Image (cartoon, rainbow, N blue to C red):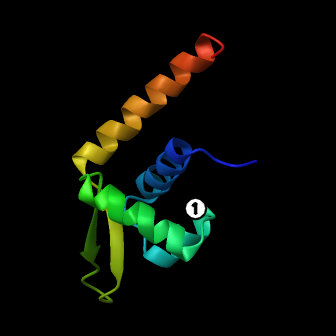
Amino acid sequence: MKRERMDIIFDILGIIAEREKIIPTHLLYKSNLSYKRLQSYVKELQEKGLMEESTNEKDGKKQFHLSDKGYQFLQRYKELKDLTVAFGI
């Protein structure tokens, strides 16, 4: 089953929210996207201020985490999905 764009964005943000911080490789595996597609989504979500990139102080690895705006988007999208289910849409 092909996922819609918004579902992919919701999945990416949800994966990050579950772990608070995640390295790119783990996000790649969990999101079930190709490297190129994931990079495209990550770039867009960072430009829109929904997720941020930082460096782990212990090992110097790049990691992603959600911004406050990302958590707000995730919450609102969940509410919208619940509403559409409730109305059978």
Hey, which quadrant is residue 47 in on the image?
bottom left
| Horizontal and vertical percent position of residue 16 | 43, 58
Q: Is residue 1 left or right of residue 54?
A: right
| Horizontal and vertical percent position of residue 88 | 66, 13
Residue sitting farthest toward the top: 87
Q: Is residue 38 left or right of residue 54?
A: right
Hey, which quadrant is residue 57 in on the image?
bottom left
Q: Is residue 55 above or below residue 53?
A: below
Q: Is residue 64 above or below residue 80?
A: below
Residue sitting farthest toward the right: 1
Report the residue at 45% width, 24% height from top: 79
Q: Label 1's element?
A: helix
Label 1, on which residue? Answer: 31
Q: Is residue 1 left or right of residue 45?
A: right
Mark 1 nearby-residue class (10 Å; few <14, some 14–19, many ≥20): some
Residue sitting farthest toward the bottom: 59
| Horizontal and vertical percent position of residue 58 | 29, 86
Q: Is residue 23 above or below residue 50?
A: below
| Horizontal and vertical percent position of residue 59 | 33, 89
Report the residue at 57% width, 61% height from top: 31
Report the residue at 54% width, 75% height from top: 35
Q: Is residue 28 left or right of residue 22?
A: right
Report the residue at 60% width, 10% height from top: 87
Three-letter amino acid code at the position of disc 1: Ser
Quarter of the image where the C terminus is located: top right
